[in-house]
Image (cartoon, helix red, strand yellow):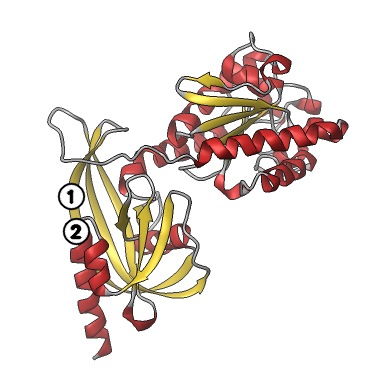
Amino acid sequence: MAGPDEERAELLTRAASEVRACTLCRLHEGRNLAVPGVGPLDAAVFLIGEAPGREEDARGEPFVGSAGKILDKALAAARLPRRSVFITNVVKCRPPANRGPRSDEIETCRPYLMTQIAAVRPKVLVTLGSTALKGLLGTGVELKDARGKTLAFGDIPVLPTYHPAAILYNRRLEPTLRSDLRKAAKVGAAKRARIRSGPPRKGKPTKPTASSGAVVVGPGERILLLRREDEDIWCLPKGTVEPGESLEQTAVREVQEETGLRVRLLRPIHEVRYSFFWPPGGVNYDKTVTYFLAEPIGGRLEPEPGFDEVRWVSREEAMRLLHWKNDKEVVDRAFQAMQTLRR
C-alpha cells in the first residue's frame, strides 16, 4: 500500500485488533475466535453477512464453511475473485447454537462495521440476507421488498441479496445470488474518481509516518514499477512499517503484497523525507521512506488490487514514467548501487 492510504490501512488494522479483543457484548463469552473480516484495502465490492458460524469461529475467517463454498461459486460465476472483495459480518462473534444476532449485539458491533466501510471506501455494498440488510440500513427495510433494487448507504449503492446459507435449503435461489453478484461486479468495475495528493496545507494536523520499500532489479537490469489505479501514477513498491517490524522486513513484505514477488534485499540505497496533504484524510503527512535494492527469488508477478499495471522497465523508461522527483532520485541511486555491486 502507498503513502496516502496509510491512514485508512491503519484504521482497518486497528478495527481488526479491537474486534479480536472485544468484550462489549455477551457474544464474546462463547467464542473461540472473533472474525473481523478479510479483503484488500481498495476493494470495490464489500460483502456483509450475518454472523460467523462454527467453521468461521474455529478459523477466525468469514465464510469458510458450507455457506462459504456457495459464496465462492457465486463469486466465481460473477467473475469476482474472492481476493478482490472485502467480506465481513454485522456481528463479529458466533452467536450460541447459531441463533440469529440480537438487536443489541448488532448495535454494539455496528461501529466496527462503520469503521471498515469508511476505511475501504467501496463502490458498492452487498448485503447477504435479511439480518445484514437490516443491520446496515435499519429495521424498516425488508429483503423481500428490497431485493432487485438498488438502495443507498450515504453515497454508496447497496445491493441486497440472499445469504448463501439460504441456497443450502433452496437451490432455486442460487441463480439470483449469482445475478446479484454480477450486478455488483459491474458497479464495482466503474473507474474510481482519481484523487491527487498536494502540498502541505497550513492549519491541518500533521502525522509522522515511516515506510520502507525496494527497487527490485530483474533480468537485463530492468526494475519493477507499479501504477496506482486511483491516482494514475507510476511508483515503486513500498508501505508502512507495522509494529514490531524492521525496515528490512517491511520492504520484503510490501514487495510481496504489492507485486506477488518474493525478494532478497541486497543493500540499503536511499532514504527520502517529504510532506504532503491527502484530501480524504484531511491531514498532512510527514513521511520518511527507506529504500533497499532487491532481487526476486520467487513468487509470481501479480499486482495487488489498487494497482492496475506492473512493468519491468529500463532506467530511461523509469525516469520517463515516474511521477515524483523523489522516486526518480531513488532509481538513480539504485543504478549507482548496481554498478558498485558489479565491481
Q: Position of residue 304 (x, y in %)?
A: 47, 54
The quadrant holding residue 155 is: top left
- The residue under the point 23% across, 84% down is 339
Q: Position of residue 241 (x, y in %)?
A: 36, 52
Q: Position of residue 72 (x, y in %)?
A: 71, 46
- The residue under the point 37% across, 71% down is 312
Q: Is residue 19 above or below residue 76?
A: above
Q: Position of residue 189 (x, y in %)?
A: 51, 42
Q: In terms of depth relative to the viewer, which is nearer, 166 or 11? A: 166
Q: Which residue is mark 2?
A: 326
Please state the total of marks drawn on the protein image: 2
Mark 2 element type: helix
Is disc 1 in contact with disc 2, using a CB cutoff of under 8 Å?
A: yes
Q: Quadrant of the C terminus?
A: bottom left
Asked whether the viewer can see residue 34, the reply is: no
Q: Which residue is mark 1?
A: 274
Q: Tell me if 235 is positioned left or right of 183 in this view.
A: left
Q: In terms of depth relative to the viewer, which is nearer, 181 or 306? A: 181
Asked whether the viewer can see residue 275, the reply is: yes
Return the disc, 1 or 2, that comes first in the chain's sequence.
Answer: 1
Q: In terms of depth relative to the viewer, which is nearer, 200 or 127? A: 127
- The residue under the point 42% across, 35% down is 11
- The residue under the point 53% across, 31% down is 124
